[in-house]
Image (cartoon, rainbow, N blue to C red):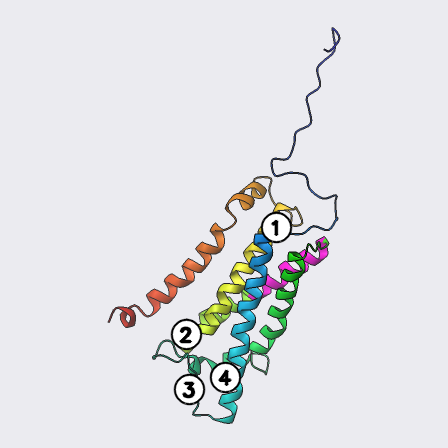
Amino acid sequence: MPTPGTIPQQAPATDPLGPLPPGGAPFGAGRGTAWLIVLTGAAGLLASWVITLDEFELLRNPNFVPGCSLNPVISCGNVMKSAQASVFGFPNPMLGLVAYGIVGCAGMSLLGGGRFGRWYWLTLNAGALAGVGFVSWLQFESLYRIDALCLWCCLAWVATIALFWRVTALNVVNRALPAPSWARPLFAEFGWVVPVLHIGVIGMLILTRWWDFWTG
């Protein structure tokens, strides 16, 4: 009981999301996030591997038709033969073999209880952002320049988008990324909404781009 004339002190406010690691201290991820990172890395690696094998086959045989060339719209062969498929002078999937392999290793480390420093998480976030930027350009080129879709490319697009938003949410929640105070609980509770909307917008663009073909 406080003595007369003294002002009762309030208990310090607690963070509703739990304690944070000390500034700059390493942090890990829950099993759900770790598995998501593993799966996005595996999906991207699978897509890159299959496309790379098909690219080699096209070099040996220009008349080769990839198995995912199903119709005039879903035509992996047309995408692979385009200039956009080798932006840096070599097939784009060769970048994916390296990048998605790193992502998969990071996810496996997290599953094993690994904890990474802020610099690592920000580097992973920056790499995922670059990946989203690159696949966004490829999406535009595929829809409005090449006029064809590659299903394996679509798998890599979804994996990259899911990875970026999950890592971004994790960094915001752990304050590795500066964000407004309201953003942390929002990303913690509804972090899945943004990637779903992002992928949904791409799906709607694909649907409307070839509306006559889908409904004909």
Amino acid type of the residue tagged 1 in the rendering: Gly
Amino acid type of the residue tagged 4 in the rendering: Asp
Q: Which mark is residue 54?
A: 4
N-terminal label among 4 and 3: 4
Which residue is at 52% across, 43% downward?
A: 189
Where 76 sits versus 109, above or below? below
Q: Which mark is residue 149?
A: 2
Q: Which mark is residue 65?
A: 3
Please identify, in this view, whether the residue under mark 3 or under mark 2 is nearer the observer. Answer: 3
The image quadrant where one finds the N terminus is top right
What secondary structure predominates along the stretch shown in magenta?
A: helix
Residue 134 appearing in the image: no
Please identify, in this view, whether the residue under mark 4 or under mark 1 is nearer the observer. Answer: 1
Q: Residues within 10 Å of mark 2 (few under 14, many from 20)?
A: many
Amino acid type of the residue tagged 3 in the rendering: Val
The image quadrant where one finds the C terminus is bottom left
The residue stretch that appears in magenta = 118-131
Q: Residues within 10 Å of mark 3 (few under 14, many from 20)?
A: some
Asked if the residues shown at circle 1 and circle 3 are in contact, with their CB atoms under 8 angstroms apart, the answer is no
N-terminal label among 4 and 1: 1
